[in-house]
Image (tube, grey):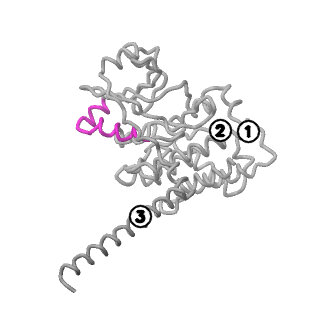
Amino acid sequence: MSYGDVTIIYYVVLCLLSICIMSFAVKLFLLCKNNPLMKRKESTLPAACKVSASSYPLMEIDAATDGFSHRRIIGKGRLGTVFAAVMPKGELAAAKRIHPRLVLNNAGFGFSSTIKWLSLSDHPHVVPITGFSEAPGERIIVTEFNGMLSLDFYLHQNPDGLALLDWGRRLRIAAGTARGIEYLHEVAAPSIIHGCVKPSNILIDAKFCARICDYGLNFLAPHERDGLVGYVDEEYWIGKRCASKESDAFGFGVVLLELLSGRRSEGGLIVEWAIPLIKGMKFSELLDPRLVIPSDFKPLIRLARVALACVGNCRKNRPSMVQVATILSNLEM
């Protein structure tokens, strides 16, 4: 056999091999495409990535809030004052104006980049951040606002709000809040630590769906005790005052105690009061006396035990929000 014949045979074999490989690849592609499991996985993928928050000139925010008019104030907290704002396109929003002293303390921090990152959060139980404004001496965060009121308002400020918060809705609020924090901890990348989980940072919409706000903003006031005492664990104050997933779980446990008892945290005194009652199975003394105890109050007992696990354990023994959200979602169902 001549050298030319060998060469021809070589190329023929190579072509046949290439055709076989291509045929196999096409068949594999068609098999995967028609696989129902693959279709279901593809259907769960988001259609598009969420766009980060818009940057607004300070003049636009000033105009949207009527010059930060006191008549537009809808809330005050440890980080700043919240104003109802009518944005340039006519949409209603909430504009949180950060306290000037906190702005001064964080002058060199990457405010805009942090807010853009936080604004990528996308979950039914998380309030979207839609914009921000940064100017000398000014830091403003714009969020979605649909007339939502805080859990703190319903529980502790509005006498009529109590009638709206029956046990079923309280359980629903607890489960929704847990799922929102679970999303921040485990789905957001990198993880987002809330830093101050408490009733005033849980908003309730018209359908009584809980939505978390002010997440990831603890960097603005890590050493501020006002508004934070009672909602973070002892390890927070002993250490470098750095929020963690475990301190968020503790704060959520305090929220559960407030939902169950109707009492305020009172700087953490609710924890000292509630732990012996839960351990002693004295649920009649624990539960909000203003509400009628349901005939089947086993879910409330389970809720109390989850609260105890969150506030009664050290960080290494505290349940994760994944575990908590799973338990409360099952209770809600």
Eyeballing the image, is 61 above or below 297?
Answer: above
Residue positioned 30% across, 35% down in the render: 112
**Residue that carries the numbered disc 2 in the rendered image:** 262
**Outermost residue, bottom side:** 1
Look at the numbered discs 1 and 2 and tell me whether their residues touch, using CB distance below 8 Å. Answer: yes
* Magenta-highlighted residues: 101-121
Q: Does the magenta stretch include residue 196?
A: no
| Residue type pointed to by label 1 | Pro
**Outermost residue, left side:** 3
**Residue that carries the numbered disc 1 in the rendered image:** 289
> Where's residue 45, x and y in %?
48, 48
For label 1, the SS is: loop
Residue positioned 30% across, 73% down in the render: 12
For marks 1 and 2, the one nearer the N-term is: 2
**Residue that carries the numbered disc 3 in the rendered image:** 25
> Where's residue 123, x and y in %?
50, 41
